Amino acid sequence: MFDLPLHPIVVHFPIVLGALLPFLAILLVWAIKKWQLPSKVWMLVSAVALVYTLSATGAVLLGEEDEEKVEKVVSERVIEEHEEAGELIPWIAGTLFLVSLGGLSTRYSKQAQMGLIVLSLVAVAPLINAGHTGGELVYEHGAAFAHLPPDHKAAIQSGTILELHEKGDHEHGEKDDDDDHDKDD
């Protein structure tokens, strides 16, 4: 597993946290009001926003490491589109973190909390765009091909990838579905 690129693994953290943040904020505003919880519970929102910021920054840095390898397979224009969409996310996340800190103040907490809810809901759109362009890189433009071992690349280019896959399955003791159908007849 450690020979896999880290960017596609790490990038899921900011996606989940960015999508979760507005709903967590809504839930906590409601819970603070409904159950008269102490306003300090809002620190949970700030903590999630901070981890969102850090994970988004990490995903961008890891994406930059991957870029050179993927440029050999995918056009630079397509990579740049995803890169620009992705580089926006840490800035958005950082802004949300700073706004979330305002929710801890005694004077403007309600305004900051409502502001965070609205901004974090709006901020889901650029997050979706970054994820979408990343998915296009992999599934439409073949970015994953840059990370394949040489024997797999050669097998794909020669059209024998299925033979290589079947050979690998049998080596690991997996049964072929056809074997089961033959026994049923």
Image: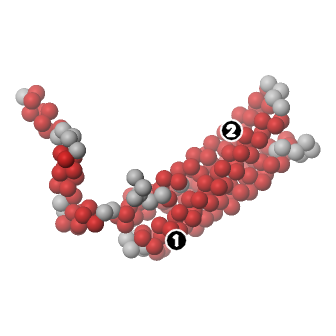
How many numbered discs, if any? 2
Q: Amino acid at mark 1?
A: Glu
Q: Measure how far apart labels 1 and 2 are at the Cα level.
A: 32 Å
Residue at the image position 61 percent from the left and 54 percent from the top: 55
Query: Crowding at label 1, few (<14), some or many (≥20) Cα neighbours within 10 Å?
Result: few
Per the image, the residue denoted by label 1 is 80
Q: Amino acid at mark 2?
A: Leu
Horizontal placement of 52 versus 103: left or right? left
Secondary structure state at the residue bearing disc 2: helix
Q: Position of residue 3 (x, y in %)?
A: 40, 59
Q: Position of residue 165 (x, y in %)?
A: 22, 52
Per the image, the residue denoted by label 2 is 24
Residue 18 in view, yes or no: yes
Q: Position of residue 156 (x, y in %)?
A: 24, 63
Horizontal placement of 52 versus 36: left or right? left
Residue at the image position 88 percent from the left and 45 percent from the top: 105
Secondary structure state at the residue bearing disc 1: helix
Query: Crowding at label 2, few (<14), some or many (≥20) Cα neighbours within 10 Å?
Result: some
Judge whether 73 appears above or below 94 on screen.
below
Based on the displayed image, in which of its 4 quarters is residue 179 positioned?
top left
